[in-house]
Amino acid sequence: MNETIQTLLNHRSIRKFQDKALSEQQITTIVDAARFASTSSYLMAYSIIGVTDPNKKAELAAISNQAYIKDNGHFLLFCADFHRHTLHATQEEYQDMLTNLENTEHFLVATIDATLAAQNAAIAAESMGLGICYIGSIRNDIDKVNDLFQLPSHVIPLFGMAIGYPADSPDQKPRLPKTSIYFENEYISDDEHKTQLQKFDASISDYYQTRKENQRIDKWTSQVKQSIANPKRARISTYVKEKLFNKR
Amino acid sequence: MNETIQTLLNHRSIRKFQDKALSEQQITTIVDAARFASTSSYLMAYSIIGVTDPNKKAELAAISNQAYIKDNGHFLLFCADFHRHTLHATQEEYQDMLTNLENTEHFLVATIDATLAAQNAAIAAESMGLGICYIGSIRNDIDKVNDLFQLPSHVIPLFGMAIGYPADSPDQKPRLPKTSIYFENEYISDDEHKTQLQKFDASISDYYQTRKENQRIDKWTSQVKQSIANPKRARISTYVKEKLFNKR
């Protein structure tokens, strides 16, 4: 098994960091790795905002309700971004572009581009011995994040990433097994899905009862039902449309 | 520079493969790498379909209009997937879940989860000396892809990935420079964006005129305008809603 595969298989989210900033060199390497990810139709429809301003970090930590968004080695905000693409268009060309940028296809393209770049950044960081945690909870108050960075139209903050020197070594969280995630040539039946999930529930119960910290009795299917049944970030739908994405 | 960073910075899309299938061991390693990617709220809202059936590969190649979707070492189809999450719910619980699954937040979560997994798969493959190419053009006829794999509600095919032993070594395609993609603490002005893009246009013109194959006169801003101004995959918006995503 090569070093890269080892890094990929060893992932765990780090939520406690040493008080030590990343160097400029480290940040450049991480951003370079992000830049060379694949991109849909060569559109590179994303941007990254590095956040070092303590006030902005504190605001983001409050929105996400997590201290480690403030206390880390560096913080990256990943945005879906078709803004730069519109800047060289005449008024007439802009109108033609707008119609297309407003469909769900282009919302998908920008979301996928930003995420490919982000995962390259994550892996680059982890390969250097740093830890990372994705922060989807910046979407708890997406308008506040938007205002904090004065984001123009066609720019949406999707998620953050806390990076730093780990001050914790949590157990690795189990994943759905290959048989539950990967199928050959056809999608599996509901019965097969259910059988797989029952097995996973049994093993995840063991994990929750025996892990180093926060032991509890729980299973994946219950967690998931609770998580999805509760209204969550309903504002996103309207916000995305206000930014001229996903309107038609 | 460690091996992983070298792999990340060395990426180029491969569109011509040797006639040699991946081994079961290679596929398992690639899928395992995908499984251990980060996932939003532990939801693991994605699935991967490995396609070996020659008829299905030929159909996908026709939809995407690219022979290398048929001729490669293996083909993966990445899907946003909240289907398995609903299977253990009572009718009442399902109704509560449905309301949330239909908002844009959950469409984002599933798209991001699938993309994180995919990029781990891509890097695992590249670290083993294999080449990959993302295939967004399966969305050219998303209904046909849906029917080909009989995908249930809450499952959307997002993109494919052709993987294999490279039979080509294309030049690396330049990327927008760090200054155009990465900002500190605040989003850059339109003037700054334009200055960056003018510089990039100059360097990309050089690339297109001097690369090994398909030399031409072109610049990024013209390409992008043309690409976005032409109607593209307008059907996606409705399809996604029919699959009970992104409805409200």
Image: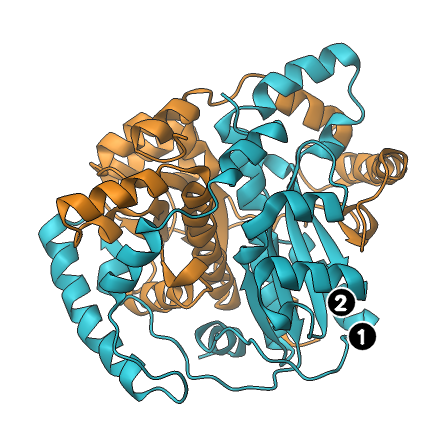
Chain colours: A cyan, B orange
How far apart are labels 1 and 2 at the CA level?
6 Å
Is B165 positioned to the left or the right of A95 in the image? Answer: left
Number of dots carrying numbers: 2
In the foreground, B208 or B155: B155
Q: Looking at the figure, which quarter contains the C terminus of chain B?
A: top left
Q: What crowding class fits label 2: few (fewer than 14 Cα within 10 Å), some (14-19), or many (20 or more)?
A: some
Chain letter of the residue beneath label 2 in the structure image: A
Residue located 23% across and 41% down the image: B95
Whether label 1 touches label 2, CB < 8 Å: yes
Is A114 positioned to the left or the right of B34 in the image? Answer: right
Q: Is residue A211 visible?
A: yes
Q: Is residue B8 visible?
A: no
Q: Which residue is mark 2?
A: A27
Helix, strand or loop at mark 2: helix
Q: What crowding class fits label 1: few (fewer than 14 Cα within 10 Å), some (14-19), or many (20 or more)?
A: few
Q: Are marks 1 and 2 on the same chain?
A: yes
User: In the rendered view, would you say B57 is above or below A163?
Assistant: above
Instruction: Name which quarter of the figure residue A221 lies in.
Output: bottom left
**What's the residue type where badge 1 is placed?**
Ser
Where residue A149 appears, as percent x and y from the top left, is 76, 47
Tag shown at residue B178: none
Residue located 41% across and 79% down the image: A172
Q: Which residue is mark 1?
A: A23
**What's the residue type where badge 2 is placed?**
Ile
In the foreground, B17 or B179: B179
Instruction: Name which quarter of the figure residue B32 lies in.
Output: bottom left
Is A169 positioned to the left or the right of A37 in the image? Answer: left
Where residue B168 appears, as percent x and y from the top left, is 55, 49
